Image (cartoon, coloured by chain):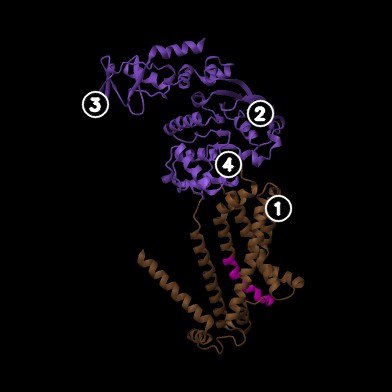
């Protein structure tokens, strides 16, 4: 558990972080959200002592970080930034090995760890291990960045706009992959972003910051449906309800019980026939981990009130209804 | 392209062969100089040995450049550390002022303190060498992407580990370029050492000036140019072995 107790950081007359009180439970992904200059990155850098705080204290599992040697502290905290910061003269393998090597792991254990991590972030060890950072695309480099941060299996992961510099398509893939990894590893993550959609998609909790102050700290759905003040309301925008749909996944509202014979599969045209409509397998079906926003978009596009949910083998495993999506709003608004 | 490379290599080998013979074989050198200076009585200095002067020159250049590299590197690293950053401006201005002294003046000034011979020559060359090395070390270290040094710090590398594993390897190319410039300039400047009897190929040039013997001046200058070329080529090969990592 990470606790910020009345944390303040000043730069001469400018107050970057103003009396911040915050508690992040272990295994939770907490997003620091806010416009540039709101103090979110500064707060992150106070936690791994890249910066020193002026007053208050931060504890990790009730240990004051001021009492831990900064280098030791940082080796137990993964860190991912937008520019990735891989060492250009090290291979992918050497980059990932940096912290385990500093911690004096033996070579065999490190080599195994590198392979495991590359697999985890979706890069084939055989292909990528010996490449240099300049041979990687932005998305690949960021995956290696995440692998490097996880190398020594730190319980805490700090991510400072990690997906800010990649194209929207790659960003979406990286976000999904990261969620999958986080589900598996259950790290305590602090994720800094100014993108509310990213915050809603990834966060268990969102801390909205402005001018160094914590304005609201709550779950994404409550931030959207019950914004604490007009600033947050403005920040969310008029399409808040659509952003809320990013928070929920098909899995939450899908109906599993389906008579298989209702969906008639046509292998030639790659479609599913249901209720007189041909659902194209590639474009009109959703997955368990598709967001409700995507689901609604497909429904609107093909004017259907129900969509088939398929698994990775393109087998129907359930269906999702428009009424249920509407009900999500109802519940959230209560 | 292939042909061009081959030709270049052959020409270079011939050139090196020529100079090796020139340096080691007095008779051959004499007959070569005779072709150009047919009317001059002595084309080879009766008391100065070409081989000796050549090695004195190499030692003078190497010793001053190596010392300057060592001290320049330390200085450059020091003023880019958190603890030394306050001295950055001071060191830079002192070193650039040192650069503006003419070599002859430095020599003249150091003779009273150090006497004649190798020491004043060494000091003068050292003063000239240190500027490019310090400034290239500073430039090299500052050119390392801040994102890289910062993330290295953030994942738990100590400042020392960052210096040796990140900053210096990434700045190496620029630092070597500084040493290369220094060495090449030093080969030329070292000829002035002869003024304070510091030895080297300058002795030949100076005696040529005194005796009004163009053959001495010519052979001294020729050998100095050859030496500069050799040093420069060595560095060129060295530099090509270091990949440019800063994209």
Kindly indicate which chain is depicted in brown in the rendered structure: B
Identify residue for label 1.
Answer: B90
The mark lying in front, picked from 1 and 3, is 3
| Whether label 2 touches label 1, CB < 8 Å | no
Q: Which residue is mark 2?
A: A17
For the residues tagged 4 and 1, is the chain the same? Answer: yes
Residue at point 54% right, 56% down?
B173
Callout 3–callout 4 Cβ contact below 8 Å: no
**Element marked by disc 2:** strand
**Magenta-tinted stretch:** B183-197
| Magenta-colored stretch includes residue B196 | yes
User: Which of the pair B93/A199 is nearer the observer?
Assistant: A199
Mark 4, chain letter?
Answer: B
Q: Earlier in the sequence, mark 2 or mark 3?
A: 2
Q: Residue at x 36, y 28 (%)?
A: A312
Q: Position of residue A211 (x, y in %)?
A: 63, 26
> Residue under circle 3?
A269
Q: SS at mark 4?
A: helix
Q: Which residue is mark 4?
A: B151
């Amino acid at each position: 558990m990470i606790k910020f107790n009345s944390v303040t950081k000043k730069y001469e007359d400018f107050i970057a972080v103003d009396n911040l009180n915050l508690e992040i439970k272990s295994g939770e992904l907490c997003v620091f959200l806010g416009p540039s200059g709101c103090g979110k990155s500064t707060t992150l850098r106070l936690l791994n002592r890249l910066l020193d705080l002026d007053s208050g204290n931060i504890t990790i599992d009730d240990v004051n970080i001021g009492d831990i040697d900064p280098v030791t502290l940082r080796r137990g905290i993964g860190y991912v930034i937008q520019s990735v910061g891989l060492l250009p003269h090290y291979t992918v393998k050497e980059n990932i090995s940096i912290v385990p090597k500093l911690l004096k792991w033996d070579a065999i254990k490190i080599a195994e760890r590198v392979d495991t991590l590359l697999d985890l972030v979706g890069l084939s060890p055989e292909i990528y291990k010996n490449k240099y950072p300049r041979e990687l695309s932005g998305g690949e480099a960021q995956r290696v960045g995440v692998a490097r941060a996880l190398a020594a299996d730190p319980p805490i992961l700090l991510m400072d706009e990690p997906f800010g510099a990649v194209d929207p398509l790659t960003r979406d893939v990286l976000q999904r992959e990261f969620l999958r990894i986080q589900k598996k590893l259950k790290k305590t993550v602090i994720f800094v972003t100014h993108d509310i959609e990213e915050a809603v998609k990834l966060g268990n909790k969102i801390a909205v910051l402005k001018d160094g102050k914590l304005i609201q700290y709550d779950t994404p759905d409550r931030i959207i449906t019950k914004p604490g003040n007009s600033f947050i309301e403005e920040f969310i925008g008029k399409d808040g309800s659509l952003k809320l749909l990013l928070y929920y996944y098909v899995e939450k509202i899908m109906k599993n019980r389906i008579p298989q014979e209702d969906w008639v599969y046509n292998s030639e045209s790659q479609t599913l026939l249901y209720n007189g409509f041909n659902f194209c397998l590639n474009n009109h079906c959703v997955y368990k981990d598709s967001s409700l926003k995507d689901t609604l978009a497909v429904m609107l596009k093909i004017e259907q009130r129900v969509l088939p949910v398929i698994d990775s083998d393109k087998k129907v495993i359930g269906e999702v209804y428009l009424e249920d999506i509407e009900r999500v709003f109802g519940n959230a608004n209560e | 392209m292939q042909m061009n490379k081959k030709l270049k290599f052959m020409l270079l080998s011939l050139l090196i062969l020529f100079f090796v013979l020139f340096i080691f074989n007095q008779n051959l050198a004499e007959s070569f100089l005779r072709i150009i200076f047919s009317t001059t009585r002595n084309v080879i200095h009766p008391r100065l040995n070409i081989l000796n002067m050549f090695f004195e020159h190499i030692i003078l250049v190497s010793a001053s450049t190596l010392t300057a590299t060592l001290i320049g590197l330390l200085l450059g690293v020091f003023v880019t550390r958190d603890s030394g950053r306050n001295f950055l401006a001071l060191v830079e201005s002192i070193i650039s002022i040192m650069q503006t002294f003419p070599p002859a003046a430095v020599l003249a000034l150091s003779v009273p303190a150090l006497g004649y011979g190798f020491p004043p020559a060494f000091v003068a060359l050292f003063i000239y060498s240190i500027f490019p090395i310090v400034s290239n070390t500073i430039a090299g270290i500052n050119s390392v992407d801040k994102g890289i040094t910062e993330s290295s710090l953030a994942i738990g590398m100590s400042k020392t580990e960052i210096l040796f594993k990140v900053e210096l390897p990434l700045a190496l190319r620029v630092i070597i370029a500084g040493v290369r410039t220094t060495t090449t300039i030093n080969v030329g400047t070292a000829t002035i050492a002869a003024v304070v009897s510091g030895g080297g190929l300058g002795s030949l040039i100076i005696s040529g000036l005194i005796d009004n013997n163009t053959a001495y001046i010519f052979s001294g200058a020729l050998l100095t140019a050859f030496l500069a070329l050799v040093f420069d080529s060595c560095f060129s090969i060295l530099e090509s072995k270091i990949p440019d990592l800063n994209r």
